[in-house]
Image (tube, rainbow, N blue to C red):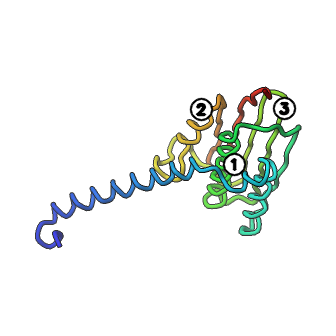
Amino acid sequence: DALADDPEAARTHLLRARNLARESLAEARRSVWALRPEILEQRDLISSIASLVGELTRESPIPIEFTSHGTPRPLMYEMESDLLRLCQEALTNALRHARAANLRVAVTFDPQHVQLCVEDDGQGFDPSLQPHGGGFGLQGMQERVERWGGHLTLASQPGQGTRLMVRAPVPEPA
């Protein structure tokens, strides 16, 4: 109603509504990240990622190769949940934006670390030019990985594909 009578007041209301919607979406995404994925209640991390890859492969014409190396060890449930969500986000981004012919996911356990690698042979991008606020965001991913003492590396260039690598220490069993 204000648009016809007072366009500037209408603009102010619309900007406020847009900001509120963005904040609500960000809060909803934070809540989703906080939930433990149901699949991890029934399976271990390796089986859960394999299931995710299988599901995404059925829904996409792009093949996704999954490998695991080393002897899987139990992780803190927050770490397992975050690794599964990071893998899901990286694969979803690649399927939507990369224009890749192939995707690869690898999980590697060594005695002190777990490593997740998601890579594609797609069009790549310049990570410094990525907008903030889309998806869960690289910053959010980085913060989650650092929370459990890990390190996230993103390597991508236009025309060169993308590689997301997460490496984190695995605590010694009690």
Neighbour class for label 1 at 10 Å: few (<14), some, many (≥20)? many
Three-letter amino acid code at disc 1?
Leu
Q: Secondary structure at mark 3?
A: loop
Location of residue 28 in the rendering, given as x and y in whole percent from the top left corner: 48, 54
User: Residue 3 sits in which quadrant?
Assistant: bottom left
- Residue furthest to the left in view is 5
* Residue occupying image coordinates x 45% and y 50%: 27
Q: Secondary structure at mark 2?
A: helix
Q: Which residue is mark 2?
A: 147
Query: N-terminal of the two: label 1 or label 2?
Result: 1
* Residue occupying image coordinates x 74% and y 68%: 61
Three-letter amino acid code at disc 3?
Asp
Q: Nearer the viewer, residue 35 or 141?
A: 35
- The span from disc 3 to disc 2 (Cα, nearest Å) is 20 Å
- The span from disc 3 to disc 1 (Cα, nearest Å) is 18 Å
User: Residue 106 sits in which quadrant?
Assistant: top right
Q: Which residue is mark 1?
A: 84
| Quadrant where the image shows the C terminus | top right
- CB-based contact (under 8 Å), mark 1 and mark 2: no
Three-letter amino acid code at disc 2?
Arg
* Residue occupying image coordinates x 72% and y 34%: 167
Q: Secondary structure at mark 1?
A: helix
- The span from disc 1 to disc 2 (Cα, nearest Å) is 15 Å
Query: N-terminal of the two: label 3 or label 2?
Result: 3
Horizontal side of 152 relative to 65 (left or right) equals left
Q: Which residue is mark 3?
A: 110
Location of residue 164 in the rendering, given as x and y in whole percent from the top left corner: 68, 43
